[in-house]
Image (spheres, helix red, strand yellow):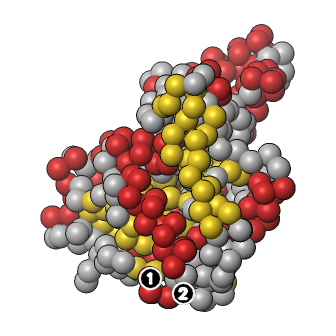
Amino acid sequence: MPAVVLIGSQWGDEGKGKITDYLAEKADVVVRYQGGNNAGHTVVVDNQEFKLHLIPSGILYPGSTCIIGNGVVIDPQVLVEELEYLEKRGICTDSLKLSLRAHLIMPYHIRLDELEEERKGVNKIGTTRRGIGPAYMDKAARIGIRLVDLLDEEEFAERLKRNLDEKNNLFNKIYETEGFEFTEIFERYRGYLPKMRKYITDTSVIIHQFLSEKKNVLFEGAQGTLLDMDHGTYPYVTSSHPVAGAACIGAGVGPSEINKTIGVVKSYTTRVGEGPFPTELLDEQGDFIRRQGHEFGTTTGRPRRCGWLDVVILRYAARINGLNSIAITKLDVLDNIERIKICTAYDYRGEVLTEFPASLKVLAECKPIYEEFEGWMADTTTARCYEDLPPKAKMYLERISGLIKVPASIIAVGPKREQTIIREAIFTR
Ligand code: IMP
């Protein structure tokens, strides 16, 4: 099964980092294809915790090549800091490759992200304020600056000047604030090059080489299906495509190359930022899940909103991403809950909805219809195979798979690598 796409099935933060990290052990190459340093994952290796935002966690394995594809937006300052952080902790970063076609996050993107959020007030998106949206806006407006442009001093200077003319106008006249100075940005960004140059290449060529040799290729999605610009809870979404189909565009491969799509599903639901969330728990139960699950953002530290598992969302994610398999994470967080609920449909003004609605107004009025389960009230963190799990936990898992008609190939019962139950080998070597 050489080419596998791994995506988030909910609103992000499903624990993809841990699953990627597990699969990376047998992957020859791990590819990120969208988003930027708005993502964040914590991986525990040999009792050491690593927090990464941009570089795929495959970097922690000496044998795997790590690629940041053309669909990713790169903040070079964050990249350089992450490289230094990894090197300081004894991790070799030589296997990293950065796409020539990836766009850069510029300082004015970060400022625009902040200013726009402030301007929107109560209607704010709740972005990570990392400049992601404005960087993708410039890409679509065909004025973005790519790594290939940064390599060419003249080209970079020209593009930067043109952008600053336009952006500084905006800062001065619309936002009534100071703009940016050409020389400062020019020198700072060219100054990142000595650290980055050796990694920059045509990554699609490398991925194709791996694919033609039938090597194991893992495409690692960031964020989640409901943050997708087309399929998510628009406008409360990110500015890229976290769905599986985007792996092709953001890495430069054709759909016929992909063999399997795995959706990561957290055993309950969380969301950061604004927007409707039908199964949200605004009570003590929600606080309990937040505490047990350490549901605070890796990137921003914000407390995540918590709620019961929503199968309407998962059925939608299964369809949009063409899921062949799911990886269920954080089962252990539910170990001490007496009664657990799964939302199977929504009640919208007396009508039963089984499909995820496009209208946020409708979604905001949806009341979850729940199925209730007796909790297993037992420790699952030491389970190492499916048979080790309490019968009631197995019932919960089987009900999830049954409801969305997708088998669970991986179950995670804690943050460590060994706390992973494998029901179907994804990569073989
Ligand atoms: P942006 O990606 O910073 O523009 O933020 C847009 C929306 O996506 C906000 O609701 C963010 O909280 C959310 N978001 C972005 N990245 C992540 C992530 O990695 N996990 C969860 N939510 C995210």
Q: Quadrant for residue 104, please give it.
A: top right
**Whereabouts is ligand 1, in terms of quadrant?**
top right
Q: Which residue is mark 2?
A: 383
Measure the C-alpha gap from mark 1 to mark 2. Answer: 7 Å
Element marked by disc 1 = helix
Residue 204: x, y in percent? 29, 53
Q: Quadrant of the N terminus?
A: bottom left
Q: Position of residue 53 (x, y in %)?
A: 61, 58
Mark 1 touching mark 2, by CB under 8 A? yes
Q: Is residue 383 above or below residue 334?
A: below
Q: Residues within 10 Å of mark 2 (few under 14, many from 20)?
A: some
Q: Residue at x 15, y 64 (%)?
A: 212
Dot 2: element: loop
Examine the rendering and report whether any part of residue 20 can be seen: no
The number of numbered discs placed on residues in the rendered structure image is 2
User: Percent from the top left, x then y, of residue 391?
Assistant: 51, 79
The one of 179 and 246 positioned closer to us in this rendering: 246
Label of residue 386 in the image = 1
Quadrant location of residue 203?
Answer: bottom left
Left or right, 278 with reference to 295: left
Compared across the picture, whether 168 is left or right of 205 comes to right
Q: Position of residue 38 (x, y in %)?
A: 62, 48
Q: Amino acid at mark 2?
A: Ala
State the residue at coordinates (63%, 34%): 367
